[in-house]
Image (cartoon, rainbow, N blue to C red):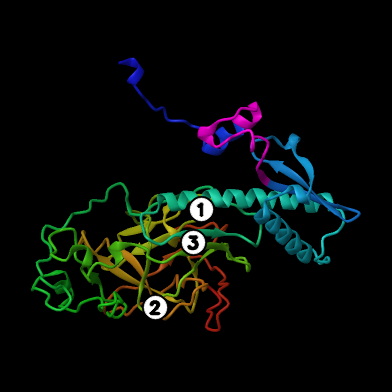
Amino acid sequence: SPENLSCSVCCKSSWNQLQDLCRLAKLSCPALGISKRNLYDFEVEYLCDYKKIREQEYYLVKWRGYPDSESTWEPRQNLKCVRILKQFHKDLERELLRRHQRSKPPRHLDPSLANYLVQKAKQRRALRRWEQELNAKRSHLGRITVENEVDLDGPPRAFVYINEYRVGEGITLNQVAVGCECQDCLWAPAGGCCPGASLHKFAYNDQGQVRLRAGLPIYECNSRYCPQRGGCPNRVVQKGIRYDLCIFRTDDGRGWGVRTLEKIRKNSFVMEYVGERRRSGGGRSSNARGTYLFDLDYVEDVYTVDAAYYGNISHFVNHSCDPNLQVYNVFIDNLDERLPRIAFFATRTIRAGEELTFDYNMQVDPVDMESTRMDSNFGLAGLPGSPKKRVRIECKCGTESCRKYLF
């Protein structure tokens, strides 16, 4: 009967927006948690200004869901937003020190200082939204955080986070026709199995750490038959990023960088260099945002991975002449030697909080692999580049072994 029918409609407004609408209309709504008791409890979006009259502190409050014109001055005792208050004073103190002023807040903020604090609050809100978007898109275990305590730059405008390689025009990936038939891939690999492609040199130990020297390819068990499946020790890179990582703004002019929030053991897989696979010499080479090209010249220089627009967290990894990441060529479902997957492994134990880096001009033993290199200005914000034009770019890695120039 009609009275027993029920339906649901997708709402384009968020839960918080609906709560704000109730408060604006002065309506109670139990389903949204709005009652007469909390009807007039409004949420602070951010703090815009500060002043001290006698011994009373006041803050100019931007209320969530209300325009700037309805911001109001409120005494501190009216505010329950402890986290926002702490962040406001932290930003204020940092900016006062940067301006070579006293760290203690003045009784009144000058307009330029107040404007900076508003821009900082808006930036932090934009970065939190971007962080949420990145984590919503990631398919890997490791979480991503975003931090900028250096300047007012927000999220990059032209970047789409992806988990798998995109295949460009004119590229065909042929899936393998056979798979692993080992009962135990590590201790009893069958002839012709995935490790068999490496002359039975199994790529990993039982802890998933790579034990092949740089330059030798890694062949992992593919999507075809494998009795161990998820527990197979020969499936490491394909499981994706397993560490919590932070995209952060560097304080020495190198743009964005990446640091680990967890200890990473030596020879452990860290991340793949993911982007758009396409033929070398074409595509987006004349844009203003620079290029992020990784030549796939394992056997011949035909293809490249472009991570300028489509990429994962490796898009933000910076160069170092003394890096803690090493490049390996990995083959899983596609065995075309011209199209390896690019994986980064730790060259040493990496401490929590340490920045992740690799050498953009990395050279590997030519007996095993042609020189692997980065073209143009991978990871360096604001430097225009051309994928096949060698430009003399100054190195800012700051290590004792710095070569002074990237290329």
Distance, label 2 to label 1, CA atoms, is: 26 Å
Q: What residue type is labelled 3?
A: Phe
Mark sitting earlier along the chain (3/2): 2
Instruction: Give the structural element (helix, strand or loop) at label 1.
Output: helix
Q: Which residue lies furthest to the bottom in this view?
A: 400
Residue 31 can be seen, yes or no: yes
Q: Name the residue under label 2.
A: 265
Mark 3 and mark 2 in contact? Answer it, CB < 8 Å: no
Nearest to viewer (mark 3 / mark 2):
2
Q: At x 25% / y 78%, what residue is drawn?
A: 206
Q: Name the residue under label 3.
A: 316
Distance, label 3 to label 2, CA atoms, is: 21 Å
Horizontal and vertical percent for residue 19? 58, 35
The answer to whether 46 appears left or right of 293 in the picture is right
Q: Which residue lies furthest to the right in this view?
A: 54
Mark 2 and mark 1 in contact? Answer it, CB < 8 Å: no
Q: At x 17% / y 73%, what residue is drawn?
A: 195
Q: Nearer the viewer, residue 197 or 295?
A: 197
Horizontal and vertical percent for residue 50? 80, 51
Q: At x 74% / y 44%, what residue is drawn?
A: 61
Q: What residue type is labelled 2?
A: Arg
Is 30 a magenta residue? yes
Q: Name the residue under label 1.
A: 131
The answer to whether 116 appears left or right of 184 in the picture is right
Instruction: Give the structural element (helix, strand or loop) at label 3.
Output: helix
The magenta-colored residue range is 22-45
Q: Nearer the viewer, residue 5 or 203?
A: 5
Q: Compared to 169, does 401 lie above or below? A: below
